[in-house]
Amino acid sequence: MGLLRRVDSYLRKYLSQKSKTKKSLSDFSVSRSSSSSSLATEEGLFEQPEPLASSKSVMDKILWRRSLQLHDQQHSWQESPDGRKMLEFRRNLPAYKEKNRLLAAISQNQVVIISGETGCGKTTQVPQFILESEITSVRGAVCSIICTQPRRISAMSVSERVASERGEKLGESVGYKVRLEGMKGRDTRLLFCTTGILLRRLLVDRNLKGVTHVIVDEVHERGMNEGKVLTNLRIVISDRNAHLMPDFLLIVLKDLLSRRPELRLVLMSATLDAELFSSYFGGATVINIPGFTYPVRTHFLEDILDMTGYRLTPYNQIDDYGQEKMWKMSKQAPRKRKSQIASAVEDTLKAANFNEYSSQTRESLSCWNPDCIGFNLIEYVLCYICEKERPGAVLVFMTGWDDINSLNDKLQANRILGDPTRVLLLTCHGSMASSEQRLIFDEPESGVRKIVLATNIAETSITINDVVFVIDCGKAKETSYDALNNTSCLLPSWISKVSAQQRRGRAGRVQPGECYRLYPRCVYDAFAEYQLPEILRTPLQSLCLQIKSLRLGTITEFLSRALQSPELLAVRVQNAIEYLKIIGALDHNEELTVLGQYLAMLPMEPKLGKMLILGAIFNCLEPVLTIVAGLSVRDPFLAPMDKKDLAEAAKSQFSHDYSDHLALVRAFEGWKDAERGLAGYEYCWKNFLSAPSMKVIDSLRKEFLSLLKDTGLVDCDTSICNAWGRDERLIRAVICYGLYPGISSIVNSVNARESEIPYPWLVFNEKMKVNSVFLKDSTAVSDSVLLLFGGSISQGEIDGHLKMMGGYLEFFMNPSVADMYQCIRRELDELIQNK
Ligand code: CDP
Ligand code: MG
């Protein structure tokens, strides 16, 4: 379409101006200075500490000496009582006993795969062993170890732990870097970061210059995408890629190994499918750290029901289709406290048609819905443990952050667990504060029972030592992607057998434990062995752009080298390529267009990148920044269960004209004003807005603006960029440009009060499937906006829509739009004439 082509030529103009100043594309992303800004560049944190080029050997010596000084400091610390205690703790970890074997393997092999029970010391010890041995060796000065973590929170907490194990402050020899945050100093040799951060580094530095060791931790964790719900950053931009990364990263790293023969790669995981990884790297060395855990007794739902006085028994029944296994629930002699819980279970069984639960197939799992009984059952088991069981912490695996919150509130409010002074109730999820984290690791006073409500983050990333009881609801929220309908779903889904075993194992760290599984044994039997890798579950658009911009060959060929199931990927890849062509990021040869090159530079979903670019070109940047930042965080409009009507009324004063996006812009501007008068919180309270989300939006806006300056699309003087920021029709058009082809005609929308909506189309950000399909974050747009700013529409439609374009011109008073419009208009006329 004309507009796409015009945008492309605008961008090309910028690009050629840029290249005149002798900057390559990739330079843009590093050109931002990492000065005093708290949002130091991601790449800046990887830079070599000093310019090594000129006097390399002298510099090396100085650096090495500094490293040794730190090392000496650490030695003297180890002599102190605290230090000795810490060393004692470390020496008792299974990994410590394997130190020499591990180091020898790493020095002799380019790729080493390490597996071992969760908590055996892989994450905290292995990188430290390498660091220690490198510092005392000749290479010490130049050693640079990167250890990737699947989640922000693990990168942050692990680096803090490792620094404290060394008696150092964070940012000395150990640092971390996650999106928007980091701590690294000139002496930092060991950097923990998210997989997404390493990817960004690879984008600008294909050979990982200066890096000596790459450790990919939790490599089995193929991205349980909890970040999406849990952290404030709902679509965690570069971390959005992070959950795709294990697979992607491995392909890239495998390529890199041949170019960097001295680079060492270590893959670590608790439940690693060692064979798969080893053969992927041509038979790489595998080292297993022998661990020790105490036996854990498993109680399935049947056993739990038994405690309540009910029994679940299978029996065979002959029906029309032959023999089928059925389930029957029968009452035993009633005991105390069962009535409530038993009837909850009974209701669920009925509702889930559990009696018809027939065979042990994955599909039939959907019949069994523990959510209906979830809380009651968890409460019941918790009460049971608190009343009847021996001392020991309880770890409850729940589906998601929202469930955790509500159960937490309920338990706190109702004193269900008895004397509140004897219970320490904590939550554990991806976005908890670090002060909260520490409480989780601490052992409570004697007589107090620690109960931790956790997401699957406590499965492998975080180890709580004193857990004796595990309650497992059997589900986790993960994104899955329905390629057929091009819909991403955020649904609670069943965990895999590996995950279930991992969860159970958490109970046996210090003594024999108990694991309560809130699902029947047959449901467990039907679990998949492994979780489907995320690469098979999410849209691959960003990934495809990265592949092109890293010049890794054709997308299809590159992804056919994926670790697992390249066949399954094929359809999805085609889908993504199609999408990228529709939005104009790839041309018909699947090469990046100029727009595509820009989109690859912006670390966000292509559609959000497109909005920013057009917002910059059309000088309506301020509101677009807000929209894009808003789409990147958890919905800032709150809807508390008990005040739904009030919350809706509050939102409707912003969204009177059928745009969630414009509503956000207005809410944010209101907040900004209030914040200036120091009344930000009050404003949020009154309007049912999340103050933390507003703050994140504020800081993301700044980040995005500086990214745009890097790309050269925005001048340092930003005043012109907003000349048209008040033209809401223009903003609607920009939203449409970004979200196309996410479009639906109003007739399909369930909630819309159809007759009132002034425009016939809704562009939407996301089509989510939670029970039924609904559109998230939508804006109503007119025919002409869709026509001009959407993608390709068929001839017939153009014909029809053109008629409605009268009166449209005033919208294009903005000179740059008018210019573009004239062009498009001419092309459209030609189209019609040729018909
Ligand atoms: O990576 P892996 O699961 O093998 O173990 P790790 O994370 O290195 O943890 C080793 C030990 O350090 C565990 O027993 C943890 O409980 C302990 N640890 C801790 O006390 N505080 C932390 N922030 C992290 C680990
Ligand atoms: Mg670990």
Image: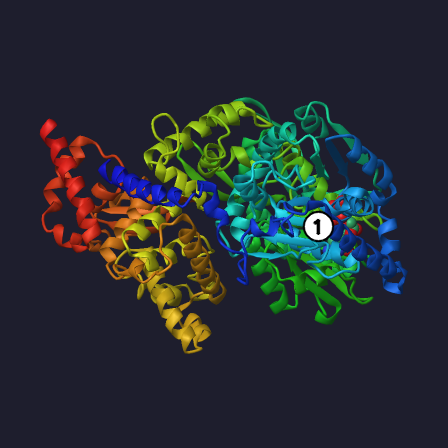
Residue at figure coordinates x 42%, y 32% from the top left: 576
Disc 1 C-beta below 8 A from ligand 1: no
**652 relative to 458 in the view: left or right:** left
Q: Quadrant of ligand 2?
A: top right
Image position, residue 711 (x, y; %): 41, 48
Q: Position of residue 400 (x, y in %)?
A: 57, 51
Q: Name the residue nearer the viewer: 63 or 682.
A: 63
Q: Is residue 329 left or right of residue 388?
A: left
Is residue 574 visible to the viewer in this orientation of the structure?
yes
Mark 1: give few (<14), some (14-19) or many (20+) Cα within 10 Å.
some
Whether residue 585 sits left or right of residue 480 in the image: it is left
Find residue 784 and report its horizontal and vertical position in percent: 18, 45
Q: Residue at x 16, y 35 (%)?
A: 827
**Residue 551 in the figure: left or right of residue 82:** left
Colour scheme in use: rainbow
Which of these two is toward me, 260 or 541?
A: 260
In the picture, which quadrant includes the N terminus? top left
Number of numbered callouts drawn = 1
Q: Secondary structure at mark 1?
A: helix
Disc 1 marks which residue? 59
Image location of residue 434, percent across then percent down:
65, 62
Q: Nearer the viewer, residue 348 or 107?
A: 107
Q: Amino acid at mark 1?
A: Met
Residue 303 shows in this picture: no
The quadrant holding residue 804 is top left
Q: Is residue 694 depicted above or below 553 in this figure?
A: below
Q: Quadrant of the C terminus?
A: top left
Foreground pick, 776 / 207: 207
